[in-house]
């Protein structure tokens, strides 16, 4: 009988449950290693041979804090086995976590090709009861399609090449299976931490057996468990990401108003966020959200809603506000440097957020492309993301230079842009940075610095949703004489020695 859920009571010997995680990316790998750490025997399958070779050698193919020690530990303990053999992994396991990519299709709709491929692989390896768990973010009703696909192709796979195309009686004895939805809420840069300390676990199921299996797997993690049906669980994930994106666009809109009327968005965010109904998280104004999830999930949710006739104009605005952040930031840069053509601009931060080397949909890349087009020469630095950035933006003498440190990037620059809020940027010695620069202009797209500190260090400082400070520097051509004299920033008069406008300070 093909499983269709409702009310079955068949027991599974949970102590013998083997788990396969299918797809070892930013979601799959932390999930697989987290489950191994909880004591489950996990087969990690990925069809990319390079990924598997690197994992077998104890190296993660992307940067994620605390991931590699866990990888090494569980390669050694035997609780985690990476393999290219996806069929074999499916055949060997009872619980299959589907963590493959769900990229954006042409029209904004999620491209579910990889999910369907997995469903068909499950169908041909259905050698006993299996629980297929959707972890990747998928549009509501995907689980129903997964169920239908497995049932459909399992029949085909189990039909012998019989005489006269006759169907076998095997159809009637297909092993049972269940499909569950268990969305991931792992943030890149905090994936391991999030796995072990989840705010909640959402489980969408149609049978007691599936619920018991999943509850048992997660039992050691102390947090509320929300049990729903399949479609509700899928929708929770979309709604969560859409709501968080909405918070970000909201605070960015508030930031623009703050800037016009002389208020401070950081203080506004704190002032509203301390109300528990609002919450302090995801209220950092800046150059907007990027990454593999928010932009694509927002579009997929919008697409789903509109396909079903819902008024999703709110989400359209969220997206529009986010897209406009780049142009607003570039305006700020132009206002600060005047003409980008021929200027050297230092960029700190390439990753779409700190603690990751991921540059997918990173706002930094859009800013960089625009400035290059306008004729600026860029000096780039990121603690982790430079190898990925170099693949799509190779170094080019005099135009694109990758630097080993933030200080090296700042050397000789006419302006410094902060595009990712890495902790190490907060710790920079701002006076030293200023001394290295040709012109002390700092445009902070992530509100990393306190305006008073930036001004004290001698910068003309522009940030997001806050007033610019230190603008009396705006006619200074060289920062170096000021640094040498170690003077406070008071511009008294200017002369034109050597044909160059030069600032004279007290
Ligand atoms: C997101 C979800 O948070 C996570 O639950 C989901 O499972 C995967 O997608 P992630 O993409 O890793 O995680 O990053 P997140 O920390 O959510 O940040 C997304 C983007 O929003 C980043 O570009 C970040 O810089 C930006 N952001 C975040 C802001 O601009 N302001 C904020 O206040 C918070």
Image (tube, grey):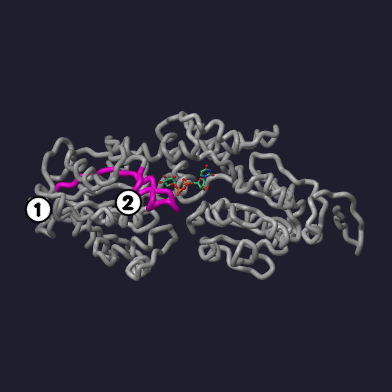
Question: On screen, 229 above or below 420?
Answer: above
- Mark 1 and mark 2 in contact? Answer it, CB < 8 Å: no
SS for dot 1: loop
Tell me which corner region of the image, top left, top right, bottom left or bottom right, holds residue 365: bottom right
Which of pointers 1 and 2 indicates the residue nearer the eye?
2
Q: Position of residue 479 (x, y in %)?
A: 78, 58
- The residues colored magenta run 176-198
The span from disc 1 to disc 2 (Cα, nearest Å) is 28 Å
- Residue 313: in sight, yes or no? yes
Tell me which corner region of the image, top left, top right, bottom left or bottom right, holds residue 53: bottom left
Q: Nearer the viewer, residue 157 or 469?
A: 469
Query: Cβ(mark 2) to ligand 1 < 8 Å?
Result: no
Q: Which mark is residue 204?
A: none
Callout 2 environment at 10 Å: few (<14), some (14 to 19), or many (20+)?
many
Query: Cβ(mark 1) to ligand 1 < 8 Å?
Result: no
Identify the mark nearer the N-term, 1 or 2: 2
Q: Position of residue 91 (x, y in %)?
A: 19, 59
SS for dot 2: helix
Q: Position of residue 266 (x, y in %)?
A: 60, 38
106 to the left or right of 168: right
Residue that carries the numbered disc 1 in the rendered image: 168
Callout 1 environment at 10 Å: few (<14), some (14 to 19), or many (20+)?
some
* Residue 287 on the magenta span: no
Q: Residue at x 78, y 57 (%)?
A: 486
Residue that carries the numbered disc 2 in the rendered image: 115
Q: State which quarter of the image contains the N terminus.
A: top left
170 to the left or right of 148: left
């Amino acid at each position: 009988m093909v499983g269709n859920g409702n009310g079955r009571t068949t027991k599974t010997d949970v102590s013998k449950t083997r788990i396969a995680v299918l797809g070892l990316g930013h979601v799959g790998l932390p999930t697989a290693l987290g489950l191994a750490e909880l004591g489950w025997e996990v087969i990690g399958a990925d069809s990319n041979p390079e990924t598997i070779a690197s994992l077998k050698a104890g190296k993660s193919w992307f940067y994620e804090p605390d991931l590699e020690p866990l990888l090494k530990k569980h390669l050694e303990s035997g609780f985690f086995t990476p393999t290219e053999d996806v069929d074999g992994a499916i055949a060997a396991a009872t619980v299959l976590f589907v963590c493959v990519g769900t990229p954006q299709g042409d029209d904004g709709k999620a491209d579910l090709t990889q999910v369907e491929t997995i469903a068909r692989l499950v169908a041909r390896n259905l050698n006993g009861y299996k629980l297929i768990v959707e972890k990747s973010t998928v549009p509501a009703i995907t689980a129903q399609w997964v169920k239908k696909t497995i049932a459909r192709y399992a029949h085909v796979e189990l039909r012998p090449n019989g005489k006269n195309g006759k169907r076998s009686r095997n159809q009637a004895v297909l092993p049972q299976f269940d499909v569950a939805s268990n969305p991931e809420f792992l943030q890149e840069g905090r994936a391991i931490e999030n796995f072990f300390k989840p705010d909640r676990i959402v489980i969408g199921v149609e049978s007691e057996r599936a619920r018991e299996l999943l509850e048992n797997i997660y039992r050691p993690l102390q947090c509320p468990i929300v049990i729903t049906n399949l479609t509700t669980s899928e929708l929770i994930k979309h709604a969560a990401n859409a709501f968080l994106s909405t918070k970000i666009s909201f605070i960015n809109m508030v930031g623009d108003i703050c800037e016009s009327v002389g208020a401070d968005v950081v203080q506004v965010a704190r002032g509203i966020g301390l109300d528990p109904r609002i919450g302090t998280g995801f209220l950092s104004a800046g150059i907007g959200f990027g990454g593999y999830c928010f932009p694509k999930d927002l579009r997929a949710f919008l697409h789903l809603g509109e396909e079903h006739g819902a008024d999703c104009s709110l989400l359209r605005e969220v997206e529009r506000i986010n897209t406009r952040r780049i142009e607003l930031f570039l305006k700020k840069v132009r206002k600060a440097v005047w003409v980008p053509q021929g200027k050297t601009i230092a960029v700190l931060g390439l990753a779409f957020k700190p603690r990751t080397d991921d540059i997918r949909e990173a706002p930094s890349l859009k800013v960089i492309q625009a400035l290059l087009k306008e004729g600026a020469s860029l000096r780039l630095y990121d603690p982790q993301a430079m190898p990925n950035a170099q693949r799509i933006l190779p170094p080019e003498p005099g135009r694109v230079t990758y630097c080993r440190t933030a200080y090296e990037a700042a050397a000789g620059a006419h302006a410094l842009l902060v595009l990712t809020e890495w902790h190490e940027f907060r710790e920079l010695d701002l006076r030293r940075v200023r001394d290295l620069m040709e012109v002390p202009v700092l445009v902070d797209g992530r509100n990393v610095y306190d305006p008073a500190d930036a001004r004290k260090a001698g910068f003309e400082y522009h940030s997001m949703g806050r007033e610019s400070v230190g603008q009396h520097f705006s006619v200074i051509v060289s920062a170096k004489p000021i640094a040498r004299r170690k003077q406070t920033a008071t511009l008294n008069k200017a002369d034109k020695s050597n044909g160059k406008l030069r600032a004279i300070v007290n």
